């Protein structure tokens, strides 16, 4: 079923969300952004308008929305947008690219985006408004928290836990059974071989903080 979706945000991540939505046959009706310099422009022929117009689109019968703002180590903007949309009555369906693989038993939270080429294997649970980005790989029995971002090409082995608001950088690898603490950031290309405390920034091979 085609769904009409508004996207909050008009930057790079919003473009990725648009590409997944249209690949599923949905219609993105507008991009809403807080930056006045973007108002009146278009992305892919879709207008960019002030973020304050969310309620107008809800009144027009557009009930579905997506959070088109990415995050690297600070998920506060994504959280704000997600909870504002929820409080207004929007639904935030998970969006999974038809060119991704998500095992049938995987649980995806509201607003989660699974991008082209990503793999999510059996037994995994993903929280709300997470990003499983281009060609990210999540193996069996992982636990991915709310507002987590798994950047392009990141790899989680089996049984990994990534707590809320953490970020696993581009091309980073996390070995089996490791826990990434809340709000921790794993740098691009790092290899994580032991648990990371909340809030740390870990880099290198093996990753240190």
Image: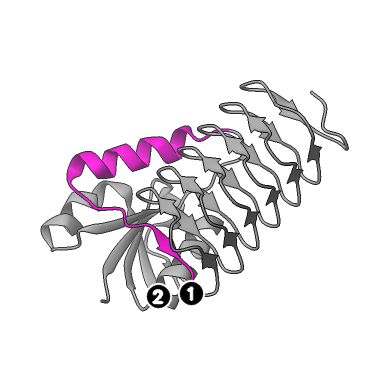
Q: Is residue 126 above or below residue 62?
A: above
Q: Is residue 99 above or below residue 179?
A: below
Say which of 85 and 105 sits in front. Answer: 105
Q: Secondary structure at mark 1?
A: loop
Q: x, y percentage for residue 163?
A: 54, 32
Q: Which of the 4 image quadrants contains residue 3? A: bottom left
Q: Is residue 44 left or right of residue 172?
A: left
Q: x, y percentage for residue 179?
A: 64, 31
Q: Where's the N terminus, which quadrant?
A: bottom left
Q: Which of the 4 image quadrants contains residue 40? A: bottom left
Mark 2 or mark 1: whose residue is earlier in sequence: 2
Which label is found at residue 24? Answer: 2
The residue positioned farthest toward the left in the image shown: 59
Task: Give, as a single range, the part of the protein colored magenta.
Answer: 74-98
Q: Is residue 27 above or below residue 94?
A: below
Which label is found at residue 98? Answer: 1
């Amino acid at each position: 079923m085609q769904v009409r979706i508004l996207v909050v945000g008009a930057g790079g991540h919003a473009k990725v969300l648009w590409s997944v939505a249209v690949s599923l046959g949905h219609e993105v009706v507008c991009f809403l952004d807080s930056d006045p310099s973007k108002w009146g422009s278009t992305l892919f022929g879709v207008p960019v308008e002030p973020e304050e117009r969310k309620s107008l689109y809800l009144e027009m019968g557009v009930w579905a929305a997506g959070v088109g703002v990415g995050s690297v180590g600070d998920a506060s903007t994504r959280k704000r947008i997600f909870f504002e949309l929820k409080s207004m009555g929007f639904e935030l369906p998970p969006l999974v690219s038809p060119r991704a693989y998500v095992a049938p038993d995987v649980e995806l939270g509201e607003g989660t985006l699974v991008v082209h080429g990503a793999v999510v294997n059996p037994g995994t649970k993903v929280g709300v408004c997470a990003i499983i980005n281009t060609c990210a790989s999540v193996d069996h029995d992982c636990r991915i928290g709310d507002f987590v971002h798994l950047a392009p090409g990141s790899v989680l082995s089996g049984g990994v836990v990534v707590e809320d608001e953490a970020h696993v950088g581009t091309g980073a690898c996390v070995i089996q059974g490791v826990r990434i603490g809340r709000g921790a950031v794993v740098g691009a290309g790092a290899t994580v071989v032991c648990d990371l405390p909340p809030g740390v920034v870990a880099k290198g091979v093996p990753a240190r903080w």
